[in-house]
Image (cartoon, helix red, strand yellow):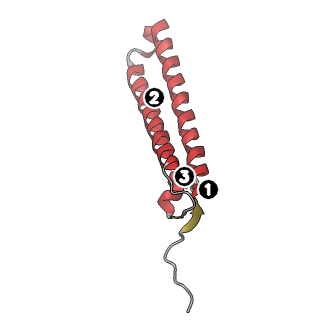
């Protein structure tokens, strides 16, 4: 009798999971740096001409900082995962794990 498998789980080696997690961590760290630069640029613009944004940049600055913090946190999470995998293990990844590792887009 054939094995019945529910869903579409994917078996991946620890080395593959580590490579995916590190690549995704680097992606999120780069995005955090991008948002930091955007935030600094906006703050500098606001300082040179305070009348341009008339306070609207405060929300934009906070939003950029939140994005930076969010990506930095995701990067830390993925690095932690990558550094704490069991060597030689096979990981059965579900859809949410594939999204976390950047293999599957979170939305279409």
> Which comes before the other along the chain, label 2 or label 1?
1
User: Which quarter shows the N terminus?
Assistant: bottom right
Out of 57 and 29, give the one closest to the viewer: 29
> Which comes before the other along the chain, label 2 or label 3?
2
In the image, residue 48 sits, relative to residue 37, either above or below, namely: above
Q: Residue at x 50, y 25 (%)?
A: 36
- CA gap, disc 2 and disc 1: 32 Å
> What residue is shown with label 1?
16
Badge nearest the viewer, 2 or 3: 3
Out of 11 and 34, give the one closest to the viewer: 11
Q: Element type at marker 1?
A: helix
> What residue is shown with label 2?
64
Q: Element type at marker 2?
A: helix
> What residue is shown with label 3?
101
Q: Residue at x 47, y 40 (%)?
A: 76
Out of 33 and 11, give the one closest to the viewer: 11
Residue 5 spot, x, y in % from top left: 52, 79
> Most extreme residue toward the top, as rendered?
48
Residue 8 spot, x, y in % from top left: 54, 71
């Amino acid at each position: 009798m054939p094995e019945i498998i529910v869903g579409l789980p994917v078996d991946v080696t620890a080395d593959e999971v580590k490579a995916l997690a590190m690549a995704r961590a680097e992606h999120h760290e780069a995005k955090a740096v991008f948002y930091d630069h955007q935030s600094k640029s906006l703050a500098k613009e606001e300082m040179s001409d305070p009348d341009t944004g008339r306070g609207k940049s405060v929300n934009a600055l906070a939003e950029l900082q939140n994005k930076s913090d969010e990506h930095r946190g995701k990067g830390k999470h993925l690095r932690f995962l990558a550094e704490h995998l069991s060597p030689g293990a096979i990981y059965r990844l579900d859809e949410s794990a594939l999204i976390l590792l950047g293999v599957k887009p979170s939305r279409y």
